[in-house]
Image: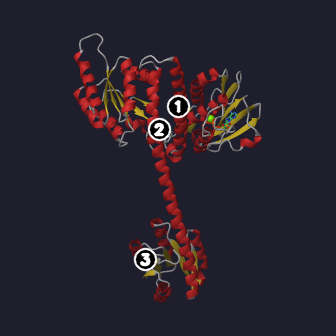
Amino acid sequence: MSGERARILVVDDEKVIRDSCTRILTTEGHIIKSAENGNIGLEVFREFHPDLVLVDLKMPGKSGMDVLEEIESIDPNVVQIVITGYATVSSAVDAMKRGAYDFIPKPFTPEEILLIVGRGLEKRRLLLESEALKVEHERIRRNMISLVSHELRAPLAATVQYLEVILGGMAGEIPSEAKEMIVRCDIRLQEMLELLRKWLNLATFDSPKMAEHFQDISLSDIATESIELMKSLAEEKKISLILETSKDLPPIKGSKVSLEEIFNNLISNAIKYNKAGGWVKVILYGREEEVWVEISDNGSGIDEEHLSRIFDEFYRVDGRRNAPIKGSGLGLSIVKKMVDAHGGMIDVESKFGEGTTFRIGFPKFFQRQKEG
Amino acid sequence: MEQIHLNRECLKLGKREEGGMSQKKRILIVDDDPDFAAAIQKILTSADYYVGVAGNVEDGMKAIEEEIPDLILLDVMMEKYDDGFNMCYDLKHDDRYRGIPVIIVTAVTEVTGLKFNPETDGEYLEADDYVQKPISAEALLTKVARLI
Ligand SMILES: Nc1ncnc2c1ncn2[C@@H]1O[C@H](COP(=O)(O)OP(=O)(O)OP(=O)(O)O)[C@@H](O)[C@H]1O
Ligand SMILES: [Mg+2]
């Protein structure tokens, strides 16, 4: 904005101030409009779309503060500078607390006003730039979501659906060697689908929207279902699944789908990063304000140096591309996001070679309301 | 287009056999992905259903008007993303069609996604069940059998 022609609005009831501002700023090449009171000022503002406004705080009629507030609600990226008498510096400070960029005390020299307006316009340039970046970032994100869900996920889903038909023998006999290869194709594509599902889950996660649909949820029901779902995976690896839940576990306020996601991720990790003959224990109990979930295993454990990073997106302890245990590294970042969305907290304790415990505390919002 | 036509014939065929003990149940797939539809069709025909396929809502509605199917598998993520939603709504608010079980099919069910979400959109949709693409033959057949 500096060096370019900017649009500046001056709102002041003193004609001298309006005229001198106009004169000084016009010589800099800016386009100036002025108004003698708040209402006219706002009218001009709406048509003029200025980059910067200079507003006198003390005017007859609508106060400068009200004018600033309305301007803020119309365009928060407009730079606001307050004109004030020496006696009212404290109200200028108030105005700045509410979002004005700077203030200039009356009377002022041409140099003073040029300096302050110059800095204000630089601020305006930065605001517009970051706004443009935000819009661009959002556009890229949306395009990416649409690309992943339609251009990538849909063809994969159709392909996997065909493989399901072929492997189910519905399209005729398959030679056994071919069948083995098709099974591998299916596994690899399923892994890719799972990665896309998780990525989409993170990219489109909207916690306020989710909170609108919170219901009473029994965590022991969720845990039971999740364990049921993981049974075959656990049997494959010869791992026992144990659920311990206190009898009158209170419900929490939450989203069923995302709580399932939390349990599925943590339990599947505890199975995946475990050894034959190992165990996975899910313990649920209520404590004063929270319901606690502990998911522990006696599997591989996580080395100290990795522990702080396992909740990062795409982070895996064994980060090699062909790591023997497959995964996207998104599971725990999803878990973290969803725990946060429930107002909960999660921490992890682990000893390399011995095992890992994840502990989540969910607030029982509902209980608290009832008691109060 | 050819496929759609052919499949409509299938639907009619089901009617012609009327009277026999083994009258086959008719399923209509409404999906704009011809490959996905063909795969699902194969699974269902293998389980002895008559299956028609429509590639968009318009053809889907035509097929239903011609002959009421015993179940509809409806993709809600078609070209215009609310097409399937609207079709489901229309069916469930029409006395002639309200009784047809509808299974919503979707490739995207994020937990709180921008798109279909059974938790938040379930009520509005009034579908009888939903499945996610891809789906195992077993799971699909179980869901279909439960509703038909
Ligand atoms: N119970 C556990 N025991 C040992 N290591 C674990 C455990 N849970 C997580 N980890 C480590 O933390 C990393 C990140 O876990 P996360 O669930 O985010 O991703 P992932 O399991 O690799 O992939 P995804 O869950 O997306 O399939 C894992 O790669 C693993 O190294
Ligand atoms: Mg995981």
Numbered disc in front, either 2 or 3: 2
**Residue in the foreground of this view, choosing between A92 and B78:** B78
Disc 1: which residue: A190
Q: Residue at x 69, y 44 (%)?
A: A309
Query: Mark 1 or mark 2, which is nearer the start of the sequence?
Result: 2
Q: Secondary structure at mark 2?
A: helix
Disc ID at residue A153: 2
Q: Give the vertical position of A284 relative to A34 (above or below).
A: above
Q: Is residue B134 visible?
A: no
Could you tell me which quadrant the C terminus of chain B lies in? top left
Asked if badges 2 and 3 are on one and the same chain, I answer yes
Q: Give the vertical position of A129 relative to B92 (above or below).
A: below
Q: Position of residue A167 (x, y in %)?
A: 48, 21
Query: Mark 3 or mark 2, which is nearer the start of the sequence?
Result: 3
**Residue in the foreground of this view, choosing between B145 and A220:** B145
Mark 2–mark 1 distance (CA, rounded to whole Å): 11 Å
Mark 2–mark 3 distance (CA, rounded to whole Å): 53 Å
Disc 3: which residue: A41
Examine the image and state in which quarter residue B33 appears. Answer: top left
Tell which quarter ligand 2 is in: top right
Query: Mark 1 or mark 3, which is nearer the start of the sequence?
Result: 3
Q: Position of residue A80 (x, y in %)?
A: 52, 73
* Amino acid type for the residue under numbered disc 2: Arg
Query: Marks 3 and 2: in contact by CB < 8 Å?
Result: no
Q: Is mark 2 within 8 Å of ligand 1?
A: no
Q: Chain of mark 1?
A: A
Q: Is mark 1 within 8 Å of ligand 1?
A: no
